[in-house]
Image: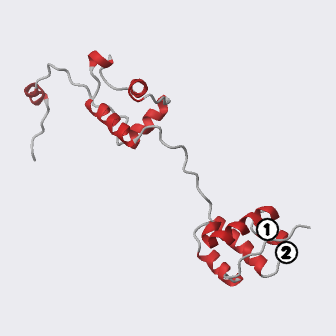
Amino acid sequence: MPATVKIRTDFSASELRRLAAGSKDANQSRRLLSLAAVLDGMGRADAARIGGMDRQTLRDWVHRFNAQGPDGLKDIRSKGQPQRLSAEQLAAFSEIVETGPDRAKDGVVRWRRIDLKRVIEERFGVVYHERTIGKILAQIGFSHISARPRHPGQKAETIEAFKKTSKRR
């Protein structure tokens, strides 16, 4: 029969309950209450049921508690995938978007996500999905709204003359 894992004794059951009551993390509170029940002498299976877990999971949390204390009972969030573009490349991409396309070189008059996808592939060698390009643009501070186009022959005085003005009261 395997030996049970000993719980560290520098925390009493009442201290663990106090920590559980003050915790903002519900999962940490459940785990603290299960450990407090074990320290009170309850069986491991019953204590695990209090925390909504099985006996093996409680054993794993006991190991984490022994190594890291009450903070070890919090969930470890995944950081996700690392960015494929470096900070320098993002800055260069931001500059590309800010300056706009060169019609002769890029073949477009305004940037679309599919065009920016192609530019990133050509200049940085990184392949993204078109949807991800929109997320990157939002991340670096650009919105999806494009400026209203202006005709190159448009005159400011004609615009001012055309505007309607109302009389003051």
How far, Cα to Cα, is label 2 from label 1?
Answer: 9 Å
Left or right of 150? Residue 18 is right
Residue at x-position 78% and y-position 82%: 40
Check contact, mark 2 vs mark 1: CB within 8 A.
no
Figure quadrant of the N terminus: bottom right
Q: Position of residue 38 (x, y in %)?
A: 78, 76
Q: Quadrant of residue 96?
A: top left
Q: Position of residue 36 (x, y in %)?
A: 73, 78
Residue 59 in sight here: yes
In the image, residue 164 sits, relative to residue 20, either above or below, namely above
Q: Give the mark nearest the N terminus, 2 or 1.
A: 2
Residue topped by disc 2: 43
Nearest the camera: 78 or 3? 3
Q: Quadrant of residue 67?
A: bottom right
Name which residue type carries label 1: Ala
Residue topped by disc 1: 48
